[in-house]
Image (cartoon, rainbow, N blue to C red):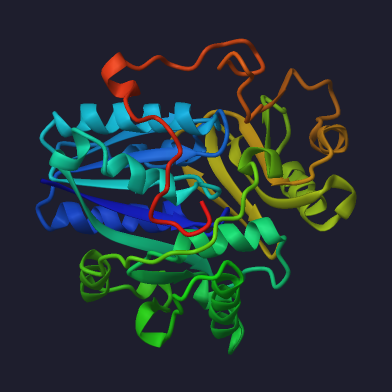
Amino acid sequence: MVQVDLITGFLGSGKTTFLRRYVQYLVAQGHSVCILENDFGAVNVDAMLLQDLIGEHCDIETISGGCDCDTHQRRMRTKLISMAMRGFDRVVIEPSGIFDVDEFYDILRDEPLDRWYTLGSVIAIVDAKLENELSPQADYLLASEAASAGLVVMSRTQLAAPGEAEAVIDHLNRALAGCHCARRFGADDVLCRDWNALTTADFARVDRCGWRQTSYVKLHFDEHKAFTSLYFLEAGRSVAQVRQAAQTLLHNAKYGHVLRVKGFIPDGGGWVELNAARDAITVQPIPSGQEVLIVIGEGLDKSAIEAAVRADRAMRKFAQVTLVTGANGHGASGTPPPTASAANDKGTRCIRPHRAGC
């Protein structure tokens, strides 16, 4: 059977960066790996950052954009069926930062996937610089994404003040208590070190960490309404201008609660990737890209953000990702989602019998 690993984590926690290192380790161990990327937004920025991993022993598949539960399950099921026929022995899935992990477990229990795949490790990436105050919805996602993890891997530990990473684990444990989950994370359940210092032994620990059976009370809310993604194509701004815009958006409440700003910017004949959270902005060169800037958060003011991001000249293209399909099963644009075969439609429902309160 093909082993599937799930890398979870809230928006901006560093899942893609860790996945890159983890997949490189797996390939070095002789595995044939396929990555399944599901980004929060119509443009899959994270998948674009992994293109250089593609080779004889690694490939990437993507699911882009938000959609209703049934549609998302059909898309993921269809991808996994096609991937199972390509000879990989490992699959690593990076869902979006607002992913309902119950969907993943439901899909793996469906035929024929239950005969082809086995769940290996669930790895939760948690930011050592996580904000102290999160909304109830964000706290729930933080807890539910980590509840079944065999290991929590802390990101950005090199930037954390003494005691800050420990305080974040306390925050995580309070969030777990808040959704009536008995799981708690202690020192033995957490990998807390600078990722630049990670060793082969560290990755071997991640590889064998497994997962935990647990339960919690589900908080019923529409993730795609609570969290919004706005994307700007061809904004025509320099790196310095985008950095300043990101800083403004992240620190001024009039735009809403902006959690993350990310994208690609042309720079002197090349490309750079920008990734911004409230306490840090990184800009690094990449081999290629597509000019796009994505703003993710809660209660976003579209008009105000557009004005902040707009170049001095008129923006050539702007779109808001609509993350809830209409009653006819189509997106707001009227474009139907990709169809799946009748066989793949079997069982496409949100049933979570192993979760209390569902």
x, y percent for residue 110: 26, 37
Name the residue at 14% across, 30% down.
86
x, y percent for residue 281: 65, 57
Name the residue at 73% across, 34% down.
237
Q: Is residue 335 above or below residue 58?
A: above
Q: Is residue 285 above or below residue 199?
A: above
x, y percent for residue 124: 42, 63
The answer to which of 336 and 167 lies nearer the viewer is: 336
Q: Quadrant of residue 290?
A: top right
Q: Quadrant of residue 206?
A: bottom left
Whether residue 239 is visible: no
Name the residue at 70% across, 64% down.
134
Name the residue at 44% across, 38% down.
38
Q: How many marks?
A: 0
Point out the residue furthest to the bottom here. Answer: 162
x, y percent for residue 26: 19, 55
The answer to which of 252 and 356 lies nearer the viewer is: 356
Asked if residue 120 lies left or right of residue 160, the reply is left
